[in-house]
Amino acid sequence: MVSKEELRAKSMIMRPGLGRLTGKGAIVTGSTSGIGEAIARLFAHEGARVVVTGRNVDRGQKVVAAIAEDGGDALFLPADVTKDDELEGMIARGREYLGQIDILVNNAGRFIVAPLEVLSADDFDAFSRLDARSYFQAMKMVIPGMEAQGGGVVLNVTSLAALDPMPVFAIYGYVKAGVNQMARAIAREYSARGVRVNSLLPGLVLTAMTDDSPDFDAVQAGVPMGRASTPMEQAYAALFLCSDEASYVTGCNMLVAGGA
């Protein structure tokens, strides 16, 4: 079995850039750590100007510093995406910085894993607001501008749990599945209007959210490839979906789960 130390060592390793997003402007929510950080860093590495956003200012500034050290261009804008005014303000300031928003990656989220008898209606509402309503609101705020400028790409980061019913993942899986369905409907709505909408469904990934899980090794042992993913492996899948190489790909649920 691959150790956590080995996965951490590879977590942010990027191959030489090919300029696949040169001239593009991207907003990546929840990009102060984990998958979102990897996406932000890779997109900048591939030529995009990137808005990094999240609630943790210190972590956000560290991501921007890492991008700058790599020769990329990024700005951190703090925002709680569950608050409409903060989300709208971040998107407006991001548009000013980028010139136009070519790519929106909805990635902000967290885990909610607990037995049914422990979960509450407040848990349901709070998680839905973060992992579904914020995605919906961001798309409403960004997609009309993408259509007006002649095109754009939206990527929603969801989960393998949207497809595979897992014990203690009831709310998490329900919300992620709903986002996938919403994304596919919006993709069809805008497919002839220049805007592509896809979803990335990661399996087990070693991030700060999963690192402390007592079940990590057991779950990793059950992955057909025999190991968890690194954040950057997810980011490379996101790069394909958001690049012009995927110009005919919309309404896609791309599962990146090592065979799970």
Image (cartoon, rainbow, N blue to C red):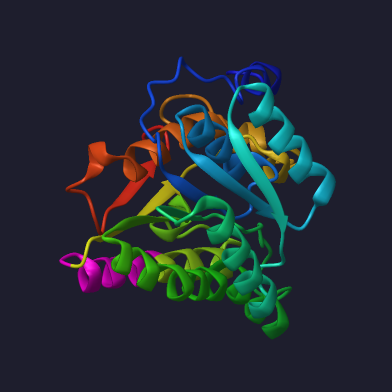
Residue at horizontal 48 percent and vertical 24 percent from the top: 226
Is residue 201 within the magenta segment?
Answer: no
Of all residues, the one furthest to the right in this rendering is 58
Q: Main secondary structure of the magenta part?
A: helix
The residue shown at (41%, 41%) is 238
Q: Quadrant of the N terminus?
A: top right
Q: Residue at x 65, y 71 (%)?
A: 89
Quarter-of-image position of residue 90: bottom right
Residue 60 occupies which quadrant of the picture?
Answer: top right
Does 36 sit left or right of 155 as displayed?
right
In the image, residue 184 lies in the stretch drawn in magenta: yes
Camera sees residue 141: yes
Q: Is residue 24 above or below residue 89?
A: above
Between 253 and 48, the one lying in front of the other is 48
Q: Along the horizontal axis of the image, is 165 left or right of 55?
A: left
In the rendered structure, the answer to whether residue 253 lies left or right of residue 66 reads left
Q: Which residues are magenta?
A: 180-192
List x then y, in percent, for residue 43: 49, 36
Q: Position of residue 248 (x, y in %)?
A: 17, 48
Residue farthest bottom in this picture: 121
